[in-house]
Amino acid sequence: MKKLFILTILSLQSLAGFGPLSDSGIRGKPYNEIIKDLQSLEEKLPNYVKVIQYGESEKGTPLFVVRLGKPRTGAKTVLISGATHGDEYLNIADRLPMFFSKVKMKKSFRKLVNNKVIYIVPIFNPDGYTKIRRENSKRKDLNRDFPLLSQNKVRLTQNETKYWVKFLDKQVNKYKLDVKLSVDYHCCYGALLFPWAYTLNVKLEPEDLMRHNQLGELMKDEIDNRYVYGSTGEILWYTAAGTSKDYYYDRYKALSVTFEGEFKKEHLKYEKHQKWWLRILKNL
Ligand SMILES: [Zn+2]
């Protein structure tokens, strides 16, 4: 039965021309080189870019986030992550720090990022990324390991999720940040997925749904008109408990989505992603 279900999904996907469920088919530099590049960006723009180690993976690999902008009370805050599933690297999240830095340096664009703080975890699961594998070194799916406090689900069994959630909460409390939006980059469906992913039975509040839909429309406008948007259950016909987007929505009431890119091609749409982000920042 499960096999038939998966086959149905695969055949629908291939009808849409979007390739297999996981594995983006896009490969990047070694993890330490990605981090080195971000550290050189920090050296060039120390007043805007800060590369922070927030913990280490189950295997002992250092975990890094890039923070753009100065955190301060009430600052509109954006969270971006890539390669939570190690084999779903899109080469988008790791290039965005450079893009936002350029926006900051350009006089006519500067106001889009002024007074905002953007946290980017370029590779959330470095050991999975290095092995080109969905799970971390303990064979655990990190996108099933986020808490859902309103449902009394604590989870956080893995260092990668535990350290990140702890670090982020500390930053938000310390600086009284206003977390407005989270985007977690995955592959490969050609979609923007909303909460709730843990159940098919609970829908977003109408006003929240409207805001998520607007983000989906902007995505279709700027990135790919064939992409679809909606709750995980509506689009993929399954539930997934412990996802990052459910956590950020539950914890911070942020607009929270998973972006599902296109197999082997999403990195070629990087310029379109930049345009999407400019419109997102304008509307935030
Ligand atoms: Zn994924």
Image: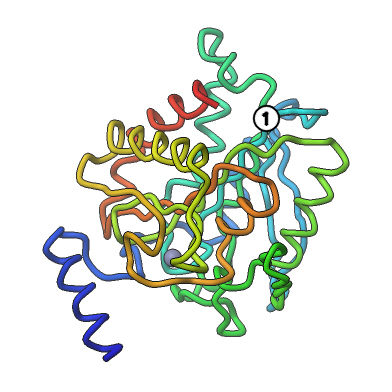
Q: Could you say which quadrant of the image residue 104 lies in?
A: top right
> Which image quadrant: the C terminus?
top right
Residue at image position (69%, 71%) is 57
What is the crowding at mark 1: few (fewer than 14 residues within 10 Å), some, or many (at least 20)?
many
* Extreme-top residue of the structure: 108
Q: Nearer the viewer, residue 153 or 133?
A: 153
Q: Nearer the viewer, residue 71 or 46?
A: 71
Residue 136 location in percent, x, y? 57, 76
* Extreme-left residue of the structure: 15
Residue at image position (69%, 46%) is 252
* Extreme-bottom residue of the structure: 1
Q: Nearer the viewer, residue 138 or 78?
A: 78
> Which image quadrant: the N terminus?
bottom left
Q: Is residue 31 left or right of residue 88?
A: right
Q: Amino acid at mark 1?
A: Lys
Q: Quadrant of ligand 1?
A: bottom left
**Above or below for 43 versus 248:** above
Q: Could you say which quadrant of the image residue 22 lies in?
A: bottom left
* Badge count: 1
Residue at image position (52%, 14%) is 109
**Above or below for 165 versus 145:** above
Residue at image position (83%, 36%) is 176
Residue 139 location in percent, x, y? 56, 84
Residue 256 location in percent, x, y? 54, 48
Residue 12 location in percent, x, y? 17, 67
Q: Is residue 42 left or right of residue 263?
A: right
Residue that label 1 marks? 76
**Above or below for 121 versus 144:** above
